[in-house]
Image: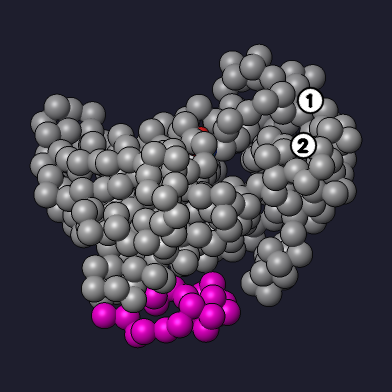
């Protein structure tokens, strides 16, 4: 049982102070923000993911995975568009034998009759053991996790993207992709990661930056148009945690310095008055010409969906990792859900 706390007091706590409210008996229960993960938990999730991938290679292994959580049910509440996150969570649930329900269009739910989102989520908790949610509102999942903690049926909440602020499970799959890519090159420690594009409104780069704090000697280059640079609160967090970062506008200057370039699209769904159209985003595109500047062992990442920031001809380059990220996302989510329901030990001893 977590200590009761009112929303105002809770919401004013620092990320690290909220961690205890997302745990049960020392295990992860809600997945809401990247700050709740430390290095041992990241290493464990990477190891568990690799173990699951190995098990899933055979039919017997798949049947074993499917037997683990057959008594569990999940709700996919995705009221902001998604392809990868929705499908990979649904696939992850299916791999573990979990049955899923979904609400993707709130016009088909009683929200249209004036029901609050809080009551909607509380209703879900009557029927399922896990609510995975994507929402345009910042900190939505955080508020729902807090809300359910105050009820008699505090089911797990997983944040699958909350407005402009966080996408923690994307960051976990990004860490897994970095971990696998650099496994034979000293790991993530000491690597230079260039985050490129609309950093102000992209939630994936925020969550990934929080996670990179857990690795020694990492350097982050924030490469963005001036008006779309990383927000001050995130930079303050990195300063406080001694993470080395620099801000740049010239992408071509940074490409040769990076071990990973993490591309993002312009997030014009958050425009107030069409301001994205005034930005020359082509300076922040990966083209075949610019690939010549990239180190031989560097990797190119993108959370997807992409527009023009990575030309499709780049897909053939062996350094392009974004399609691998898509696949990794499903396996990392299997690992995370297994961990939430304490099935991880059985998996590790398979
Ligand atoms: N990376 C990601 O969140 O993709 P979707 O928006 O398609 O889920």
Visible in this render: residue 316?
A: yes
Let me know if residue 332 is in the magenta part. Answer: no
Visible in this render: residue 208?
A: no
Residue drawn at (44%, 43%), measured in percent from left and top?
A: 106
Q: Check disc 1 and report its element: helix, strand or loop.
A: helix
For mark 2, what is the residue?
Answer: 255
Find the distance from the CA under tag 1 to the CA under tag 2.
Answer: 8 Å
Residue drawn at (57%, 22%), measured in percent from left and top?
A: 318
Q: Quadrant of residue 317?
A: top right
48 relative to 143, above or below: above
Dot 2, how many residues are within 10 Å of its Cα: few (below 14), some (14-19), or many (20+)?
Answer: many
Residue 92: x and y in percent read: 30, 39
Residue 241: x and y in percent read: 64, 72
Q: Taking 340 as reference, is 277 left or right?
A: right
Residue 253 vs residue 202, the one in the foreground: 202
- The magenta segment is 1-22
User: Label 2 near label 1: C-beta < 8 Å?
Assistant: yes
Residue 65 vs residue 13, the one in the foreground: 13
Residue 109 vs residue 194, the one in the foreground: 109
Report the quarter where the N terminus lies: bottom left
Tell me the tag on residue 290.
Answer: 1
Residue drawn at (37%, 56%), measured in percent from left and top?
A: 120
Q: Point out the tag, 1 or 2, that comes first from the N-terminus.
A: 2
Q: Check disc 2 and report its element: helix, strand or loop.
A: helix
């Amino acid at each position: 049982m977590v200590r009761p706390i009112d929303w105002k007091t809770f919401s004013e706590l620092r990320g690290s102070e909220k961690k205890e409210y997302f745990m049960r008996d020392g295990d992860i229960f809600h997945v809401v923000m990247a700050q709740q993960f430390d290095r041992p938990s990241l290493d464990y999730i990477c190891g568990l993911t690799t173990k699951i991938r190995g098990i899933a290679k055979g039919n017997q292994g798949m049947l074993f995975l499917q037997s683990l959580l057959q008594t569990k049910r999940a709700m996919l509440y995705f009221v902001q568009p998604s392809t990868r996150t929705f499908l990979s969570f649904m696939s992850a649930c299916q791999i573990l034998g979990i049955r899923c329900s979904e609400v993707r269009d709130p016009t088909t739910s009683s929200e249209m009759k004036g029901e609050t989102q809080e009551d909607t989520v509380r209703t879900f908790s009557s029927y399922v053991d896990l609510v995975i949610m994507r929402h345009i509102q910042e900190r939505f999942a955080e508020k729902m996790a807090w809300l359910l903690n105050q009820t008699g049926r505090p089911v797990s909440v997983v944040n699958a993207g909350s407005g402009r602020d966080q996408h923690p499970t994307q960051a976990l799959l990004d860490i897994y992709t970095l971990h696998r890519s650099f496994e034979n090159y000293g790991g993530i420690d000491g690597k230079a990661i260039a985050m490129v594009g609309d950093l102000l409104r992209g939630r994936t780069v925020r969550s990934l930056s929080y996670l990179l704090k857990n690795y020694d000697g990492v350097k982050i280059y924030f490469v963005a148009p001036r008006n779309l640079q990383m927000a001050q609160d995130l930079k303050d967090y990195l300063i406080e945690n001694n993470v080395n970062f620099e801000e740049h506008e010239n992408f071509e200057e940074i490409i040769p310095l990076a071990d990973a370039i993490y591309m993002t699209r312009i997030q014009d769904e958050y425009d107030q008055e069409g301001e994205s159209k005034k930005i020359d985003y082509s300076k922040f595109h990966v083209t075949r010409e610019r690939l010549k500047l990239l180190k031989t062992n560097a990797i190119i990442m993108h959370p997807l969906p992409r527009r023009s920031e990575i030309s499709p001809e780049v897909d053939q380059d062996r350094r392009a990792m974004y399609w691998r990220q898509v696949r990794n996302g499903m396996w990392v989510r299997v690992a995370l859900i297994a961990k939430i329901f304490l099935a991880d030990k059985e998996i590790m001893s398979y």
